[in-house]
Amino acid sequence: MRWLWIDRIVELTPGERLVAIKNVTMAEEHLHDGEGAIPVMPASLVIEGMAQSAGLLVGHASGFKEKVLLAKIQRASFEREAIPGTTIRYDARLVRMDAQGAATEGTIELIDAQDGSVSPMGSVDLLFSHLDQNVAGAEFGDVNFVFGEAFETLLRLSGIEIR
Amino acid sequence: MQRDEIFAKVRDVLVESLAVDEDEVQSDARLTTDLGAESIDFLDIKFQLEQVFGFRVEEGELFPDNVAQDHEYVADGKLTDKGLAALKERLPHADFGELESDPRVAKVPEIFTVDAIVRFCETKLQAAG
């Protein structure tokens, strides 16, 4: 299994905004790990989906030269859960960015496959660190292990130029 | 903007960023040892201050950037006299009292008290007119 929690980037305004979607399917094991009778997408993985969407936005802004790591979940709130057959739509916006890192704000919507209705699901604000710019001066090598092959495939699939 | 008003805004930023109670944010509280700030929180605080006050904070202006990596400034894990002088010049808002008697690099984050952040914001706002 690949650690990818978005299926496609559907919109990108470089340095400003990235919109991505994830289709939730019954076949995903983690949907069945909860206590309720209805399978739902765990909130932690929804946050990861936003982190990947916003992280790609931040990474793209520096030409994927920086190793962008999720450093802090500033705020996460949910008003609905995602069930199989829905599409999660992540809308990430870059609020601030400097040499050391970036702050993003994001809203999440649910698109229902049955009637195409769109409902707000929640919001997640994040803080990212540029790993190589750490204050301690630690070095992590030349290879950008954050944006590896899986992300390259996703970007290519979404029609986004990587480098 | 009056100092009380600046303090109130700084307190709100620290409450939000560090998840501490309002009454913990006293003027002499140190961001790291008293309020539990970690290195990434400094970036968060910087971003939030920029947003709340509308000024831009340059790299190394509020918190030190690469002093610890400069061999002229650090020897055996301690700041040299030159390093301490450079920090004082770059960060006039910080509280150097204890660092002067114990100049270990690990102690550098402790120079940032709530009052130091308020002083920094006050200076920035005055400069902006």
Image: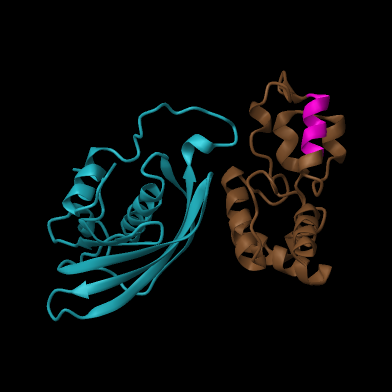
Chain colours: A cyan, B brown
Nearest the camera: B90 or A3? B90
Say which residue appears at 27% left-offset and 67% top-offset.
A89
Work out whether A103 lies above or below B84: below
Residue B32 in the image: state x and y as whole percent: 69, 45
Which span of residues is magenta-colored? B80-88
Q: Is residue B58 magenta?
A: no
Residue B74 in the image: state x and y as whole percent: 72, 23
Quarter location, residue B57: bottom right
Q: Is residue B84 magenta?
A: yes
Say which residue appears at 57% left-offset and 46% top-offset.
B40
Numbered disc total: 0
Q: Is residue A63 left or right of residue A154?
A: right
Task: Quadrant for the N terminus of chain B, please.
Answer: bottom right
Q: Is residue A26 visible?
A: yes
Residue B17 in the image: state x and y as whole percent: 60, 58
Task: Quadrant for the C terminus of chain B, please.
Answer: bottom right
Nearest the camera: A128 or A23? A128
Work out whether B89 lies above or below B102: below
Name, please, the residue furthest toward the top.
Answer: B76
Work out whether B89 lies above or below A44: above
Instruction: Considering the whole magenta stretch, tell me its main secondary structure.
Output: helix
Q: Is residue A37 visible?
A: no
Q: Is residue A36 left or right of residue B73?
A: left
Say which residue appears at 71% left-offset and 40% top-offset.
B109
Say which residue appears at 70% left-offset and 32% top-offset.
B106
Residue A102 in the image: state x and y as whole percent: 49, 52
